[in-house]
Amino acid sequence: MPAQKVKISETVRINSLVLHRQKQGKAVFNLGAGEPVLDTPELIKRAAEQALRENKTLYPPVAGIPELRKLAAHWMNNKYRTHFKPDNVLVTNGGKLGLYLIFQSLLKQGDEVLLNSPYWVSYPGIVKLFGGKPKILRTTEAGGWKITPNCLKKACGKKTKILILNNANNPTGILYSKSELKGILKVAAEKKLTVISDEVYSGLIYGKNKFYSCASFGRLSKNSMVIQSCSKNFAMTGWRVGFVFAESQMVKILTGLLSQSTSGVTTISQWAAVAALKYPQKFTLPLKNELRKRRDVLVAELNKAFGLSLKRPESSLYLFVKMGDLGAKKISSMEFCKGLLEKTGVALIPGSACGQEGYIRFSFGSKPEVLKKAIKILANYCKKLN
Ligand code: PLP
C-alpha cells in the first residue's frame, strides 16, 4: 500500500485531539491513551542524567548498546525461561518499530498475516504498508476473546505466512494459558507460520495466572519472534525503548533496516533502560500494584454507575466494554467517542478502531481521581443520550 494511503493510528489521533483540547485550556479525562500515567522511577531518571553528564551522547551501536542487549536477554531468560543471547536482541525505538521492521523484512505482496480481532489498532496498518493482507480471526466475548488451535488451522491458506499473537492482550486484557499457547504454537509449526508474539504487557499481570512467553516452548518456539518494550513494563512510554528477540541472523537483517532509518535508539534512553533492566522487579512490582488499584477503581466505578457486574481484566491496561452495557445502542462506537470527547472531554477508544464494533476500550492507566471523574461524566452523558 502506498504510504500516502496509510491512516494515522486511531489511538494517536485521539491522543492528538486530547492534547489540542488541553492546549486550549479545556478539561480532559484521558482514558484513551495506552500508557501508565506515572512518573518514570527516580533511579531510571538518574541513570539518564548520569549518561548525559558522562557525555554518552554520540551515535549508539545500531543494534543497541551491548550492556542493554545483554541485560534484555537476561531479563527474558530469567523471568520467562527463554534462552536468548545478546545477539538475539535488537533494541528498537519502541516495540512498534520492532514490528514495523519485521514486517518490512518478511512480507511480500499478497502474503496473509493472521491476527485476531479485537486487535491493537496498529497491526492492520503496518501489515498493509508492506503489501501484506491482514486476515482476521474473529473472537468473541463469550469465547473469552481467544483464538483456538482449531480456528487457526481453518484460517490457514496457501498464502498465510505469519500469525501475530498479542498476549497479554490489548484491548481485551485477556491472558493465554500455557496449554492454550502450546496448542496454538503446534498448529503454527504444522502450518509453517512465523509467529510474532507481541508481549509488551508481560509485566502487567494482576491475578494468579502466570504469563508465558511464546519463546519458552523449546522446539515449538523455533519460528517465533518476540516483541518487547520498556514502555508499559517500566512506565517509560516516552523514552521509546523496545526490543525484538529473534534468531541472530534475523537480528542482523533488522539491524540493516535500522541502520538505514533511525540509526538506533537514543543513547540516553538506552542507558535509562539499562537501569530499568538491572532490577526489573523493583520497578515492575510497584507499577503493577498501582495499576491493579486503578483497574479495580475503574471496574468498581463502572459497575456502580451503570449497575453492571463487569469482571476485572487479568492483564494489560484495558477494559473492553459492550456499548449496550452503557446504554449506548443506536450509535457507532466512533460517533459515540467523538461526541463524548467533544462535549465532555472524556477520551475513550472506539471498538471499531480495534476491529470490533459495538464495544469501547477504557484504559485504566490514568490516575484514580481522573478515572472516577470520567466515569461520573460518562454516566451523565449516557443518561442524556437516549
Ligand atoms: N504492542 C501493543 C499491543 C501495544 O498496545 C503497543 C502500544 O500501545 C505497542 C505494541 C507499542 O508500544 P511501544 O512502541 O511504546 O513499545
Image (cartoon, rainbow, N blue to C red):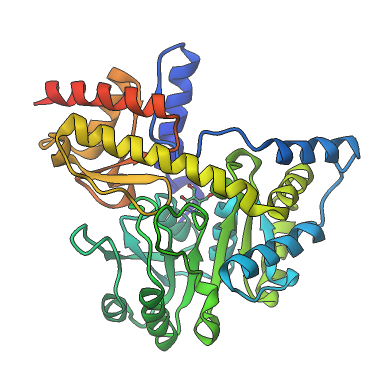
Seen from this angle, which residue lies furthest right?
A: 54
Whole-percent x and y of residue 76? 62, 66
Of the 4 image quadrants, the one containing the C terminus is: top left
Would you identify the image quadrant in which residue 134 lies? bottom left
Q: Nearer the viewer, residue 78 or 72?
A: 78
Locate residue 25, reporting x and y percent: 46, 11
Compared to residue 240, the image places residue 91 above or below, namely below
- Residue 123 in view (yes/no): yes
Q: Is residue 304 left or right of residue 20?
A: left
The image quadrant where one finds the N terminus is bottom left
Residue 120 lies, in percent from the top left, at 40, 52
Which residue is drawn at the image coordinates 80% and 35% (left, top)?
49
Q: Of residues 118 and 378, which is closer to you in this image?
A: 378
Image height of 94 relative to 79, above or below: above
Residue 8 visible to an observer of this rendering: no
Q: Quadrant of residue 74?
A: bottom right
Q: Where is 206 relative to 235, above or below?
A: below
Q: Nearer the viewer, residue 332 or 107?
A: 332
* Circle count: 0
Residue at the extreme front of the image, as rendered: 208
